[in-house]
Amino acid sequence: MAYRYKIEITDVTLRDGMHAVRHQFSVEDAKAIAAALDKTGVAKIEAAHGDGLGGSSIQYGFAKEAEEDYLGAVCGAVHHSQVVALLLPGIGTLEDLKRAVGLGIRGVRVATHSTEADISAEHMEEARKMGLDVVGFLMMSHMTETERLVEEAKKMASYGAHCVYIVDSAGAMLMDEVRRKVSALRAALPDDVQVGFHAHNNLGVAVANSIAAVEEGAYRIDASLAGLGAGAGNTPLEVFVAACEKYGIGTGVDLYAAMDAAEDVVRPRMMRPVLTDRTALTLGYAGVYSSFLLHAERAAQQFGVDVRDILVELGKRRVVGGQEDMIVDVAYEIAHGREAKGHGALTSSHRG
Amino acid sequence: MKKLSAAIVGSGNIGTDLMIKLKRSPWIEPRWMIGIDPESDGLRRAREMGLETSADGLKAVLEQGVRPDIVFDATSAKAHVRHAKLLREAGIQAVDLTPAARGPYVIAAVNLEEHLDSPNVNMVTCGGQATVPMVYAVSRVVGVRYAEIVATIASKSAGPGTRANIDEFTQTTARALEAIGGAKRGKAIIILNPAEPPILMRDTIYCLMEDASAEIRDKVRESIEQMVRHVQTFVPGYRLNREPIFQDDLVSISIEVEGLGDYLPVYAGNLDIMTAAAVKFGEEYARHKMQVASAEEAR
């Protein structure tokens, strides 16, 4: 059939999905999932610790496997798809990237907070020189006004990005905002620089947001098998592909193969179901980085406080991605009675 | 003895803040400010404060025959590699505030006196000056098999040099956690937060201890408190956000650094701790030179 749009999907099960399994996928898990993804025909597979290359840490959680074993396994298990990695300057380094290239990755997605693109210049320029596919990843895009996002995206394009993403790390965006931001980027960037969109399902609209992004000119969309990812998960690959089929969007992904991979390969490996429970929902509602989910639950337990109070307070303080250490500090403060104001913000703003 | 004469290279945030602090020093007199942008705010301020200024870079100034006793380099890691060579050839003491790490590391709170005879010392990074003392406070009590720090700074306090040097920041800080902090392995993470009003510099320090018995924990707690008081002697706004939290063999320490507000406002504690550390080294070096000089006179 003739499609209205043609897009390219990057699967993030083996990277964002790592948040949902506390970065505990084994080499065997990685091989099985990568092989299943490869069969779906998906263009790109992102693999790494949830926080990217070099992310294994006390702050974000130690990965089960050494980075090179994990990435090596993924690269070795695919024939069709390109393997890419995530890199957050400030966490991972160019040295980490060079090692990953040695293991066989073909692209890198360089992620910064959506106002801090200039810390990615060195990494992107070097990645271009290495012949990699280079993506700029503007995290927590919901916190940043459209005009500023455009400026930051242009910077990333000037560093050599083939594609710049609007990243809804907190799953806090609704369709209007996605349309506004994606279309502004599309209008402002040179034609040869693609626009991408990465969703989290914390408000239940990941698929709808992703389709809206396609309509506004996004060419690359992120998804993951069974939605495995931080918070309430990412755009579920199999659901998105089915919706795209009905909508006239060509993805190049085999729907049944994606369904089977989600059902038979990923679901049995989940530590807990990916769902919009009260914690994940609060992330989207308060606009907080999705990978805080499990860390916040642990801190809530450790200090005997309501996880929603922690998340809402973090949202108010405009904490950005990577500041997982603030979770414990805020939980500690709540438990010790400081910052007692602030509580109940969720209910009071509901009333308003 | 008269004050040592100093030049500051780099008229950005760090260089300008450093100039204001050196102006107060009883040991050092800042006489030259050397930049590359004649329009920079730092050079303008330096002129106002009575320093000789140049926008032609260090090489040109040295070629004019200017010979400071001590040069503070607040440019970038790449530029310092060139500057280090020029200063060595001219026989001038270099204090490197970039993460270039040509000379040995100096963490003001830990090994201030160790490298007074080294012609080039490296002040590591702001994150290093703030967090290495905490790792050291733990490792002087019990073996630390792994130390990890997370430095969160306000976007506004990170100038173009810092932004272009992100990898050097994490790598140099991590090495200092090992070399000076005493951890067997170190890792550093930096995060920029654009919130308005800007946040104070905030660091979390994690140490995995080789022994976490109740007795050791008490000693570690005490050692941390002692170290905080020591750092406060030259960075008054350095403080714990909360008690250290112990969990199994992990201790997690959270600190905040409020700056003096000399150049950038108080949120830029990262600038403050770096420049305060450099001044502290400079003064220690001046005292040391004076002792050497008076000992020679006595002979």
Image: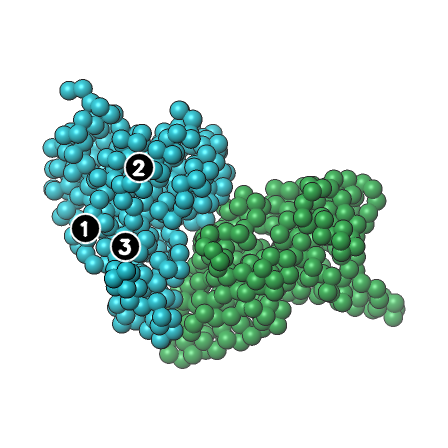
Chain to which mark 2 belongs: A
Query: What color scheme is it?
Result: by chain
Find disc 2 in the rendering and name its residue.
A179
Measured as percent of width and height from the top left, residue A172 is found at 29, 49
Q: Residue at x 68, y 50 (%)?
A: B42
Q: Which residue is mark 1?
A: A274
Q: CA distance from mark 1 to mark 3?
A: 17 Å
Inspect this view and state whether residue A132 appears: no
Quarter residue A77 falls in: top left
Q: Quarter holding the N terminus of chain A?
A: top left
Label 3: chain? A
Chain B in the picture: what colour? green
From the viewer's side, name the closer residue of A264 and B234.
B234
The total number of labels drawn is 3
The cyan-tinted chain is A
Q: Which residue is mark 3?
A: A285
